[in-house]
Image (spheres, grey):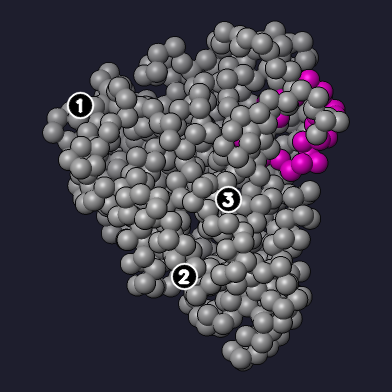
Amino acid sequence: MKRIAPKLAVAVLGATFTFGAISAKAAAPEYGGNLNIVVGSKIPSYDGHIESTFGMIHPIRPFYSLLIRENPDNPASPTDFVCDICVGSVPEGTEGGTKFTFKIRTGVKFHDGTPLTSADVKASFDKVVNPPKGIASNRKAYFKMVESITTPDAETLVFKLKHPSGTFIPAVAMPFNFIYSKKDLDTHGYTWHQKNINGTGAFSFVEHVQGSHVKGKKNPNYHHKGRPYLDSYTALAAPKMSVRLQAIRGGRADIEFRGFPPKARDDLVKALGDKITVQESDWNCVLLASPNHEVKPFDDPKVRRALTLAVDRKSGSKYLSNIAIVKTPGGIVFPQHPMATPMSELKANIAGYSDDVAASRAQAKKLLKEAGQEGLKFTFLNRGVDQPYKIVGTWLLGQWKKAGMKVDQVVKPTTPFYASLRKKGDFDVSVDFNCQSIVNPIADVSKFLPSAGNNYANFEDAKLESLYDELLKAGTPEEQTPLLRAYEKRVLNDLSSQLVTLWWYKINPHRSYVKGWKIAPSHYLNQSLDNIWIDAAEKKSQGVN
């Protein structure tokens, strides 16, 4: 690091590093300019309520507002939330922490000119919390504690909870909870937003040219006065990492919000010097493998446990962290959070975490033989995104081979990949991920609930559901931690319903004339673009048009 970055600024939540020139005093933001973003994935749909991919968030989030959001000036904090569509401070719970009353801004308009009221916010959260039959909601499980949502008047929204829950406010702040117009939902139906855009965000929709770009222009009526600073932004589709790197290096793009591997960072710094700034952070995102329990032999827990026993996470971390955006071994909780299970406990209690890899693989072979699946053959479904899916997927195939398994890999582009997970179920074992926004362990681990809309393993387990219900009602970390440990053990060990590979590591190089944006431990956070500005003089000095 010293070789390429003699100046280093450090902030805390899992270490955020910033390379490049650091001014003693921040300059005043400037207005104007277009921000060019490169995005490494296609857009499955525009609907934030059903999607969970950066491929949607990065180009589409700037068109929408949220009820509350992470503080854009302090996005690394898991507890610093500010009002977006609401006014004042984020409310404290009343009635024993079971009632949250939000006052809604007046004068806010959707991009089509329709005034926003509390009815629009209620309709949006109804779609997330209690969707009609046949309508998907990817984060429904995060709101299991909600009893009712009411609107006493046009400027007031009230959530009543069944019980107090420390996960509620962070769940409300998730960046996928786009505020939609009730008129649009009533008139066009609950699938309209998958292909149409009408929000109240900092930018209004201009165009989407498939395979090329999404364009947004400044919303002059944006409710955060004085913002956005940019005149426009363009999200350029660039599935290949080499194309994204060359775009930033050559000045055709300004920033990539998802993250590059270490070598790419080093190459950019070497080529551009102080023309590039690099921000780094641990990442609340983990790559999984999900067996399809409805497909034999993966209905057998012995077979599923063999999959995880074959994986050497320790050596994988050492090797893969040099070439991919993954780094840290861990369980189902973000490893930098105080409630995460220490590695010593994972090694002692969870299959597949032992340092004795040879013994683990011998056990895997034994279990497969007992299940009548010696020399197991299956197909692994992977997503057509280079980092880290293809790299980690290829590594997994090698790990399973060392336990006597014979695995073919099929790679699908993002849209058909999601179709296989959500609709068709035509896979044996699939790459999967739990990429969250706000670091909120109890909400984050809802991904592993059989009833969760984003759990693609296709199984039921009453004990797991019961444990999670207890976890939601636990009021303190002291009460929550043992329940979280039991829940994790049920997922990773007893059921082996899914397996964890490695947690990700976020590296964001951007042109140094891009100002105002701060990294968070998630590639979903701080993506409204209303706080970003371009230093025109610095951009000109770099020879970028």
Which residue is label 1 attached to? 155
Q: How far apart are marks 2 and 1 (CA)?
A: 44 Å
Q: Going from the N terminus, do you reach mark 2 or mark 1 first?
A: 1
Q: Using the rendered image of the protein, determine whether residue 397 is visible from the camera's viewpoint.
A: no
Foreground of the two, 11 or 203: 11
The quadrant in which residue 63 appears is top left
Can you give x and y, in whole percent of width and height, for residue 15 in the image?
Answer: 63, 36
* Amino acid tagged 1: Glu
Q: Can residue 151 be seen in this view?
A: yes
Quarter occupied by residue 287: bottom right
> On the image, numbered disc 2 is attached to which residue?
490
Q: Is mark 3 on a helix, strand or loop?
A: loop
Residue neighbourhood size for the residue with mark 3, other residues' Cα within 10 Å, grouped as few (<14), some (14–19), many (≥20): many
Would residue 205 appear left or right of 335 to someone viewing this image? Answer: left
Mark 3 or mark 1, whichever is nearer to me: 3
Q: Name the residue under label 3.
A: 335
Q: What stretch is highlighted in magenta?
A: 252-279
Residue at 71% in and 82% down: 362
Q: Which of marks 2 and 1 is in front?
A: 2
Residue at image position (67%, 69%) is 354
Q: Quadrant of the C terminus?
A: top right
Q: Residue 269 magenta-drawn?
A: yes
Is 180 situated left or right of 488 in this image? Answer: left
On residue 202, the disc is none
Q: Contact (CB < 8 A) between labels 3 and 2?
A: no
Q: Does residue 47 belong to the magenta stretch?
A: no
Q: Please say if 214 is above or below 392.
A: above
Amino acid under disc 2: Arg
Distance from disc 3 to disc 1, alpha carbons, whole Å, reads 40 Å
**Residue 498 appears in which quarter of the rendering?**
bottom right
Tell me whether circle 3 and circle 1 mark residues in contact (CB < 8 Å): no
Q: In this view, does 290 lie above or below 401?
A: above
